[in-house]
Image (cartoon, rainbow, N blue to C red):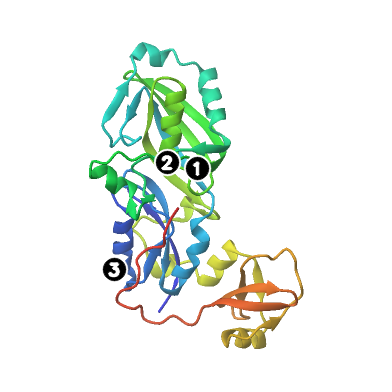
């Protein structure tokens, strides 16, 4: 059965679980996973794994990401986005008085290596239960701050409307960064409150939204990124001889040129272009970490998703 990675442009209102369920039907297999959730409010790139390629999602989850977002200054909400209830509302005069210099300083302070307190309605687990589930149950959830990296936080445009100041921004960040927390913290720093009104994920590592398809238009067979193509976008490549491919398939170590720069998994590719597996260099040998045999029919109760950060 065909395997590979599939790039989906998730529509607003869909959950990541919805996208996985729909793709299972389209692909004719239960073995479908995703590499990082998007809130129903958000749109944009979801990377899905089909059949044996779900094992590659581990190497997608932690990649850096890019987002386009709209931050509304002048109101704080319970969820740090437009779906929450209003907590505070600044006067229109106060919002109008925010200067470009103040915005630039606030954005600068939230760029680089920073500490960020995730939103209480995040998917982070607290004693085995998702934080958002605890909030919905009426609990007061305060998550500890943690280090994140915001490599770029760029203001694209600003619009004053209806007593609010809407900022269109582009953010490039490490995995685990919450864009709505950036909106919340920018609004707090400016003294007017802030929340997220729109969010679109445009990139995960080497995968871009321009190459994704809407679920209504996806052709699974035509749109799949092959396991070999996906693995070599994510990891260094080792081209094998026919004999090496056979040996690795049997779990044997193979001889390679020592390379001290290859400290992590390497994608081992057979002469015909098939992903044989992932290997680890150990001196002048490569040891198999994970083999990719020809795909088999999926088991009926495979896990539907890969844990995300």
Please name the residue that numbered disc 2 is placed on.
118
In the image, residue 86 above or below residue 143:
above
Q: Position of residue 289 (x, y in %)?
A: 57, 75
Horizontal relation, residue 165 to residue 15: left or right: right
Q: Nearer the viewer, mark 3 or mark 1?
A: 1
Q: Secondary structure at mark 3?
A: helix
Q: Residue at x 35, y 68 (%)?
A: 303
Q: Residue at x 37, y 67 (%)?
A: 32
Q: Front-most of 209 and 99? A: 99
Please name the residue that numbered disc 3 is placed on.
25
Q: Position of residue 174 (x, y in %)?
A: 54, 47
Please name the residue that numbered disc 1 is placed on.
146
Which residue reaches farthest left?
A: 137
Q: Nearer the viewer, mark 3 or mark 2?
A: 2
Q: Position of residue 251 (x, y in %)?
A: 58, 85
In the image, residue 96 above or below residue 297:
above
Mark positioned earlier in the residue sequence (3 or 2): 3
Rendered image: mark on residue 114? none
Q: CA distance from mark 3 to mark 2?
A: 34 Å
**Residue 243 in sight in this render:** yes
Dots 1 and 2: beta carbons under 8 Å?
yes
Q: Secondary structure at mark 2?
A: loop
């Amino acid at each position: 059965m065909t395997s590979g990675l599939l790039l989906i442009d998730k529509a607003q209102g869909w959950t990541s679980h919805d996208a996985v369920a729909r793709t299972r039907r389209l692909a004719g297999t239960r073995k479908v996973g995703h590499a990082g959730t998007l809130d129903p409010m958000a749109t944009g790139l979801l990377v899905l794994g089909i059949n044996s390629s779900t094992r590659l999602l581990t190497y997608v989850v932690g990649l850096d990401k890019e987002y386009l977002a709209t931050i509304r200054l002048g109101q704080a909400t319970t969820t740090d986005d437009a779906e929450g209830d209003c907590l505070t509302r600044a006067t229109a005069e106060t919002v109008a008085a925010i200067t470009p210099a103040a915005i630039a300083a606030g954005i600068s302070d939230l760029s680089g290596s920073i500490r960020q307190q995730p939103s209480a309605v995040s998917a982070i687990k607290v004693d085995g239960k998702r934080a958002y589930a605890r909030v919905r149950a009426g609990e007061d959830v305060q998550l500890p701050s943690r280090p994140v990296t915001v490599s770029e936080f760029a203001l694209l445009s600003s619009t004053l409307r209806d007593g609010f100041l809407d900022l269109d921004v582009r953010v490039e960040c490490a995995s685990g960064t919450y864009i709505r927390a950036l909106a919340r913290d920018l609004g707090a720093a400016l003294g007017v409150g802030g929340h997220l009104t729109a969010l679109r994920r445009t990139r995960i590592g080497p995968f871009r939204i321009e190459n994704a398809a809407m679920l209504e238009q996806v052709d699974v067979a035509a749109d799949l990124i092959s396991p070999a193509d996906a693995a070599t976008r994510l990891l260094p490549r080792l081209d094998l001889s026919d004999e090496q491919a056979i040996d690795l398939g049997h779990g044997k170590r193979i001889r390679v040129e020592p390379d001290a720069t290859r400290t992590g998994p390497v994608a081992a590719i057979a002469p015909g272009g098939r992903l044989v597996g992932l290997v680890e260099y150990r001196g002048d040998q490569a040891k198999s970490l994970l083999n990719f045999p020809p795909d088999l029919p999926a088991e009926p109760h495979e896990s539907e998703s890969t844990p995300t950060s």
